[in-house]
Image: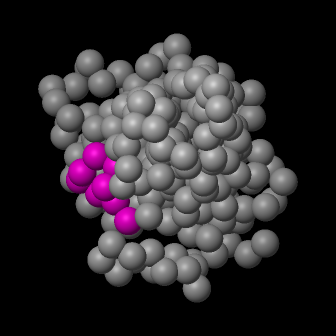
Amino acid sequence: MGKILNIGVLVSGSGTNLQSIIDACAREEVSARVACVISNKADAYALERARLAGIPALHLDHRAYTGREAYDEALVATLREFEVELVAMAGFMRIITPVLLEAFPNAVMNIHPALLPAFPGLHAQRQALEYGVKVAGCTVHFVDPGTDTGPIIIQAAVPLVQGDTEETLSARIQKEEHRIYPEAIRMFAQGRLNVSGRTVGVN
């Protein structure tokens, strides 16, 4: 498989996208390994997923730090300890600062349940339903200092169907998230992604 990429995954919730990354690495579909999983919430089920897979699972409580920058400095120190090369945010409910972004330039990814730039921020599926769109979806992007504004790596479209609720739409979008997030990481691990301004080229 060649060189194995070390990934650090940041989580706050149940960790279904984390699981998709762990599974893709285990199947050797991605030349990578999850080196550590870090959550700002002690009860995040994602930490249990990490433990079950034999991956270091760490709780860094943001309330123990004086501010966002101090917390991100602790994140960077921990990620460096595990020799992380790519940071994957998977339901990490924190606004990150340039402290983290500058430590990992063009190496912090996030997944968002909408076709960005439409419906950034919270409750994207609800926003899509309320707006009356015909097609929703999900986006993997590199993170920049804005909210869901970074260069787009890969997207998947999910058509709405009559009678969709926030729950049914979210479930269908999540299936696509579990497919495209490992794919984005696979391309990164292969050195195939090149960022030029807002454009991510794929070699």
Residue 64 picture quarter? top left
Colour basis: one colour
In the image as oriented, which residue stretches furthest toward the right?
A: 27
| Residue 134, x across and y down, in percent | 54, 46
From this view, report whether residue 29 is shown above or below residue 65. Answer: below
| Residue 103, x across and y down, in percent | 31, 59
Q: Is residue 26 left or right of residue 121?
A: right
161 or 74: which is nearer to us? 161
From this view, report whether residue 137 is shown above or below residue 163. Answer: below
Which stretch did the figure color magenta? Answer: 143-151
In the image as oriented, which residue stretches furthest toward the left?
A: 66
* Residue drawn 34% across the image and 38% down it: 121
| Quadrant in which the C terminus is drawn | bottom right
Residue 69 picture quarter? top left
Residue 145 falls within the magenta-colored stretch: yes
* Residue drawn 35% across the image and 81% down it: 196
Residue 191 falls within the magenta-colored stretch: no
| Residue 184, x across and y down, in percent | 59, 62
* Residue drawn 74% across the image and 27% down it: 52
131 or 2: which is nearer to us? 131
Q: Is residue 9 left or right of residue 99?
A: right
From this view, report whether residue 188 is shown above or below residue 191. Answer: above
| Residue 98, x across and y down, in percent | 22, 53
Name the chief secondary structure element in magenta: loop
Can residue 11 be spotted in the picture? yes
Q: Is residue 143 left or right of residue 43?
A: left
Q: Is residue 102 left or right of residue 151?
A: left
In the image as oriented, which residue stretches furthest toward the top?
A: 43
Can residue 92 be spotted in the picture? no
* Residue drawn 78% across the image and 72% down it: 1
In the image as oriented, which residue stretches furthest toward the bottom?
A: 203
124 or 182: which is nearer to us? 124
